Image (cartoon, rainbow, N blue to C red):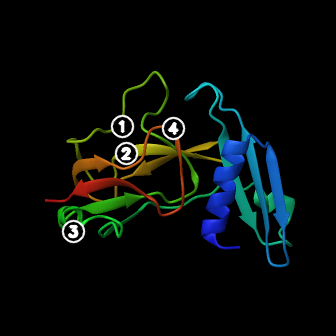
Amino acid sequence: MKLTEIQDLIKFVARAGVTEVEIEQKEFKITIKSEMPRGRGKKDEPMVQAIQVPAGMPQAMMQAPMVAAPAAAPSATPDASDSDAEETNDYIEVKSPMIGTFYRRPAPDKDLFCEVGDVVKQGDTVCVIEAMKLFNEIESEVSGKIVKILVDDNSPVEYDQPLFLVDPS
């Protein structure tokens, strides 16, 4: 199953209000569960998680937390117009290291980690991604000024999805 097919399936589950979908094929098994968030976000917006594992993997392994380091690499958005591409060539993307829900603050009653125009240093926490009921602080791998936040608060994000644009100069 391709990543785009999995993403489409996750979006369908979120829109349809289905609580669980499980697909098992020869080489893998994927389970997508949807539940209502507790204490975060909009009242009727479901939270969706996708877990993909090889078909023969034990159940205990599926419950292990995902740990990954954030990735940052310079690139331009392929769908952008020429002027947008020129503007983003000098910026570095802070990307999501995992699938989960993106939050701009540590708790609903706390201040934002960063805003457009803020200067961040390498190692500063820029957001939190909730994956499998674990809140993972995402740290910037570059120093610079936040020029754009590419994801809305309380939104699902995919692995390697750009979250922020940082101007390293």
2 and 1 marks in contact (CB < 8 Å):
yes
Q: Looking at the picture, which amino acid does disc 4 mark?
A: Asn
Going by the picture, which residue comes out furthest to the bottom?
A: 26
Q: Looking at the picture, which amino acid does disc 1 mark?
A: Phe
From where the camera sits, is residue 8 visible?
yes
2 and 3 marks in contact (CB < 8 Å):
no
Mark 2 or 3: in front is 3
Question: Dot 1 corresponds to which residue?
Answer: 113
Q: Is residue 87 left or right of residue 36?
A: left
- Residue 95: give x, y in percent of width and height: 42, 59
- Assign a secondary structure to mark 4: loop
Q: Please, is residue 2 above or below residue 100 in the view?
A: below
Question: Dot 3 corresponds to which residue?
Answer: 82
Q: Quadrant of the C terminus?
A: bottom left
Q: Residue at x 49, y 28 (%)?
A: 107
Label 4: few (<14), some (14–19) or many (≥20) C-alpha neighbours in 10 Å = many
Q: Earlier in the sequence, mark 1 or mark 3?
A: 3
| Observer-nearest of 136 and 100 | 100
